[in-house]
Image (cartoon, helix red, strand yellow):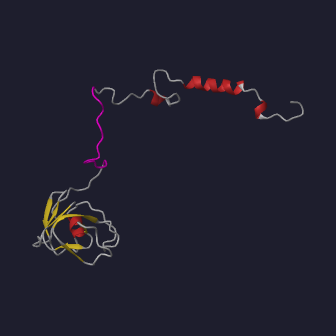
Amino acid sequence: MPGRPSTTADRPRRTARASTTRRRAACRPTAFAGPACRPTPMRTCTDPWASWTTSPPRSSIRGWRPAGSIAPAPHQPPGGPVGSGPEVSFARSGLHVPWNDVQESLLELAEACDVPVQWSCRTGVCHTCELAMMSGTVDYYPDPVEPPAEGNILICCSKPTDDVVLDL
């Protein structure tokens, strides 16, 4: 329109379409059926499962450890006198250890045996270390702020009074 300044809306649209069409033509893959604009090295990638005659394997979390993990397997506590107290069994780890009064709590025994366990406070406040006790009885020192749920214990502040089986 005469007398009005030119804006982008006044320009012909075919110029924009022509440049888009040229860009699309330049990005078309040659023999790759994937998305159009991939870098050249990605265009030559092949399907890693293409050579499989059956479906690809399914991933599983069971038994998985990160690459480079050097976490030791659970074992008897190193050195020190052998305990003469009640037997502490870690069910998942398959470890049976006699209680020794050298440890202040079941948490310290689990750590000495490299049994993986979660904890935070070590005084029975946070309940992070709460886990199922399959059998046995324990005493608490110090007493937890709130008791654990029925059938569970706080291993950070508990000591066995007789043979116990823990879900660890």
In the rendering, at what x and y percent does residue 135 appear?
Answer: 16, 65
Q: Residue furthest left?
A: 84
Q: Residue furthest right?
A: 3
Q: Residue furthest top?
A: 31
Front residue of this view, candidates 87 and 80: 87
Quarter of the image with the C terminus in it: bottom left
Front residue of this view, candidates 128 and 47: 128
In the rendering, at what x and y percent does residue 13 appear?
Answer: 72, 27
Quick check: 1 above or below 149?
above
Residue 90 visible? The answer is: yes
Corner quadrant of residue 26: top right
* Range drawn in magenta: 53-67
Quick check: 56 above or below 91?
above
Q: Magenta stretch: residue 82 in it? A: no
At 50% from the left edge and 24% from the top edge, which residue is drawn? 29
Quick check: 103 above or below 43?
below
Corner quadrant of residue 24: top right
Corner quadrant of residue 159: bottom left
At 35% from the left edge and 70% from the top edge, which residue is drawn? 126
Quarter of the image with the N terminus in it: top right
Direction from residue 42 to residue 14 in the image, left or right: right
In the rendering, at what x and y percent does residue 31 appear?
Answer: 46, 21
In the rendering, at what x and y percent does residue 139 appear?
Answer: 20, 75
Q: Residue furthest bottom?
A: 142
At 67% from the left edge and 25% from the top edge, which residue is drawn? 17
Q: Magenta stretch: residue 62 in it? A: yes
- Magenta: main secondary structure equals loop
